[in-house]
Image (cartoon, rainbow, N blue to C red):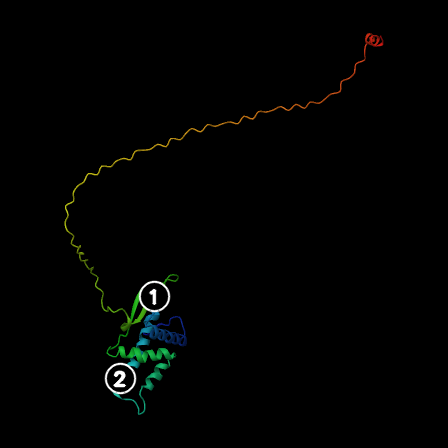
């Protein structure tokens, strides 16, 4: 039973969970805002704010001159934070840019905004961001609707509208007369070609009387 056991395991081992928070804190310091699950955002909030407090203490010691002789920056606090923030760009951003802005803020450097559910597994999502790098309007949002002010119409001289009767003149309809087209049927006279074939006539034998006449 997990009675009085604080923190979320996030389904990871101790070393994996610490590496996850270190990477998320690095992204938060570089981009000032990240979108993740609600459980991870709430776990990251305390982890990141402790690192920001270390940077604030380092800045205060540098301004008060409480550093060892020969040092111009607080190396001790930078080395402690460097155990978790491995990127030099993120480390420099934290100590040089973020710490001077949040110097007068007593805690509460981050804000978690719920963004609904994630498509697919239905996980709760949220945005964690640095308060001083969020929208310029900070604070509670009023739920009352603002009334729109009536826009003043430009002054135009009043002109009495004269009612004019408009007579619509119908344009004469011009009918296009199409001349009838005579269809001339070409009559092709069919000429019957009769093949005249000379048939040989058979000679009939002459009668006896004709023979006698020929002899006479």
User: Which residue in the rendered view is the most extreme toward the bottom?
Assistant: 69
What residue do we see at 36% from left, 78% from top?
Answer: 89
Label 2 crowd (10 A; few <14 / some 14-19 / many >=20): some
Q: Is residue 75 in sight in this rendering?
A: yes
> x, y percentage for residue 58?
29, 84
Q: Mark 1–mark 2 contact, CB under 8 Å?
A: no
Q: In which quarter of the view is residue 40 placed?
A: bottom left
Label 1 crowd (10 A; few <14 / some 14-19 / many >=20): some
Label 1: which secondary element: strand
> x, y percentage for residue 210?
81, 9
Q: Report how far apart the C-alphas of labels 1 and 2 lie in the structure.
A: 36 Å
Residue 98 image label: none
Residue assigned mark 1:
125
Residue assigned mark 2:
60
Which quarter of the image is occupied by the C terminus? Answer: top right
Looking at this view, is 186 or 21 the one in front? 186
User: Which is nearer the N-term, disc 1 or disc 2?
Assistant: 2
């Amino acid at each position: 039973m997990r009675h009085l056991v604080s923190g979320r395991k996030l389904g990871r081992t101790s070393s994996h969970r610490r590496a996850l928070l270190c990477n998320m804190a690095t992204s938060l310091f570089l981009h000032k805002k990240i979108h993740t699950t609600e459980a991870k955002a709430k776990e990251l909030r305390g982890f990141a704010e402790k690192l920001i407090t270390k940077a604030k203490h380092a800045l205060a010691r540098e301004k008060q001159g409480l550093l060892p002789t020969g040092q111009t920056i607080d190396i001790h606090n930078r080395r402690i934070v460097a155990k978790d923030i491995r990127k030099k760009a993120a480390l420099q951003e934290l100590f040089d840019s973020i710490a001077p802005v949040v110097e007068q803020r007593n805690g509460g450097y981050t804000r978690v905004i719920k963004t609904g559910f994630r498509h697919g597994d239905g996980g709760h999502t949220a945005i964690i961001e640095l308060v001083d790098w969020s929208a310029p309007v900070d604070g509670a949002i009023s739920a009352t609707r603002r009334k729109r002010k009536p826009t003043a119409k430009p002054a135009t001289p009043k002109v009495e509208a004269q009612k004019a009767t408009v007579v619509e003149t119908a344009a004469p309809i011009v009918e296009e007369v199409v001349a009838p087209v005579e269809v001339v049927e070409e009559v092709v006279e069919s000429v019957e070609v009769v093949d005249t074939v000379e048939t040989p006539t058979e000679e009939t034998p002459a009668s006896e009387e004709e023979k006698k006449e020929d002899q006479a």
